[in-house]
Image (spheres, rainbow, N blue to C red):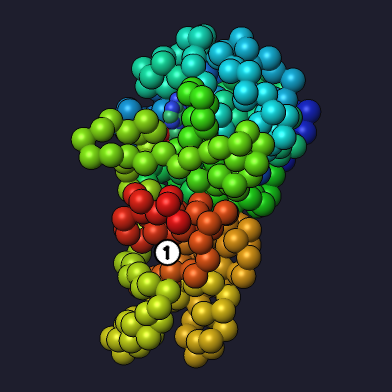
């Protein structure tokens, strides 16, 4: 199979619609990361997404719809959730609701809930309007690999295995959507992202991070897996151990390797003699650069050396969670920060 990378045109949208109707999988740009989409009502198409990614069968997918799609066809929407949709959608917020069971049971892996996202990307919206049905889509990367923020990243993981990537250039947000459990009386953040705990709490009075207690079944199964891992060797140093990172860098260079630092701007600027991938200064810049830098790092470094950024809270909760997990650090309780 040839994999085509196409911009949104009447022709590419007509083809995307045909492919989805035939049970095929189409990758598409969103404002967070690229998605790998299939008709959410088609069991075989949804299973194909799991198979392509090598995704564990208990890690549910998000149903994507356009802004005019009536989500009450799919889920129960508690009254208190309306102001969140009003404020944050379309945008990088996924809301988990009680499901009405109208899509394939494989989307939610048998859970009684369904997560729904309304992307703001014009490419995603054009695609979702063209098909006019819920599209089940995880990030368009092989399971556990770094999420894709360009069409080329999707191509690198799935060339020859999917027919079409709808190209919208680089994803501006850079990290996956915030996943918010809206099935109780207080919203719970299952995955941190650009819509922060503080922003949600401002709208509805309260918002907590979901934390997994020992022996409990995770409410968001994806939390249990190592994610976002670059394919090269890695090392990681705390924000207060820059000297350790430098020693590690020099040792690798001394062995004839090609070490690269991945760190925030202040650290990169303080170490001009080291090759580094500069994440930037603001939390939004760091989110936007993170996955592209991890992919560049794995292509160009023999050893990618991460240095923990100093910031905490807000968007940094999402950035730190991805970064720590990419470097195999335990980010389980990192939500607290
Ligand atoms: P990805 O598709 O790779 O962005 O991952 C989707 C994330 O949303 C994973 O962490 C899932 O565990 C989570 N998720 C999707 N649907 C649900 C659901 N119904 N309940 C809880 N978490 C969900
Ligand atoms: Mg993913």
Position of residue 167 relative to residue 240, above or below, is above
Q: Is residue 16 left or right of residue 228?
A: right
Quadrant into which the C terminus falls: bottom left
Relative to 328, is 23 above or below?
A: above
- Residue 62 visible at all: no
Question: Can you name the residue that lies furthest to the right here?
Answer: 10
295 vs 84, nearest the viewer: 84
Q: Position of residue 132 (x, y in %)?
A: 68, 17
User: Residue 123 at x, y = what percent?
Assistant: 71, 36
On the rendered structure, is 204 left or right of 192?
A: right
**Residue shown at 41%/16% (left/top)?**
112
> At x 32% / y 67%, what residue is drawn?
233
Residue at screen point 59% across, 47% down: 198
Q: In the image, is 134 to the left or to the right of 66? A: left
Residue 173 percent location from the top left of the image:
63, 50
> Relative to the observer, which residue lies in front, 79 or 168?
79
- The number of numbered discs placed on residues in the rendered structure image is 1
Q: Position of residue 25 (x, y in %)?
A: 52, 28
**Residue 207 visible in the picture:** yes
Name the residue nearer the viewer: 275 or 281.
281
The answer to whether mark 1 is within 8 Å of ligand 2 is no
Residue at the spot of label 1:
298
Q: Which sits in the foreground, 130 or 4?
A: 130
Judged left or right of residue 251, residue 287 is: right
Residue most extreme to the left: 215
Label 1, residues with CA under 10 Å away: few <14, some 14-19, many ≥20: some
Identify the residue at horizontal 63%, vertical 44% (top origin). 199
Task: Quadrant for residue 176, please give it.
Answer: top right
Secondary element at tag 1:
helix
Q: Is residue 245 above or below residue 211?
A: below
Query: In this picture, is 114 found above or below 261?
Result: above
């Amino acid at each position: 199979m040839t994999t085509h990378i196409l911009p949104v045109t009447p022709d590419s949208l007509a083809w995307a619609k045909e492919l989805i109707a035939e049970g095929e999988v189409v990758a598409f740009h969103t404002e967070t990361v690229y998605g790998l989409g299939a008709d959410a009502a088609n069991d075989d198409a949804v299973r194909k997404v799991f198979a392509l990614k090598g995704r564990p069968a208990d890690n549910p997918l998000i149903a994507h719809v356009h802004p005019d799609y009536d989500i009450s066809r799919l889920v129960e929407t508690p009254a208190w959730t309306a102001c969140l949709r009003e404020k944050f959608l379309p945008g990088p917020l996924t809301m988990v609701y009680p499901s009405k069971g109208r899509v394939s049971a494989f989307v939610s892996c048998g859970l009684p809930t369904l997560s729904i996202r309304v992307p703001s990307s014009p490419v995603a919206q054009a695609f979702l309007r063209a098909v006019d049905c819920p599209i089940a889509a995880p990030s368009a990367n092989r399971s556990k690999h770094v999420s894709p923020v360009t069409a080329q990243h999707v191509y690198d993981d799935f060339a020859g295995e999917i027919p079409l990537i709808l190209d919208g250039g680089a994803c501006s947000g850079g990290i996956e959507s915030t996943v918010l459990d809206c099935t109780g009386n207080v919203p719970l953040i299952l995955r941190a992202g650009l819509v922060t705990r503080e922003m949600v709490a401002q709208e509805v009075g309260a918002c907590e991070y979901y934390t997994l207690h020992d022996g409990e079944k995770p409410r968001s199964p994806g939390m249990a897996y190592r994610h976002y891992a670059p394919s090269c060797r890695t090392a990681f140093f705390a924000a207060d151990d820059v000297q350790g990172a430098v020693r590690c860098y020099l040792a690798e260079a001394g062995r004839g390797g090609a070490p690269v630092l991945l760190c925030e701007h202040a650290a990169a600027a303080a170490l001009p003699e080291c090759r580094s991938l500069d994440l930037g200064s603001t939390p939004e810049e760091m989110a936007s650069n993170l996955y592209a830098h991890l992919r560049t790092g794995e292509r160009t470094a023999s050893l990618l050396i991460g240095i923990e950024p100093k910031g905490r809270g807000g968007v940094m909760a999402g950035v730190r969670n991805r970064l720590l997990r990419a470097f195999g650090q335990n980010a389980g309780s990192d939500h607290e920060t």
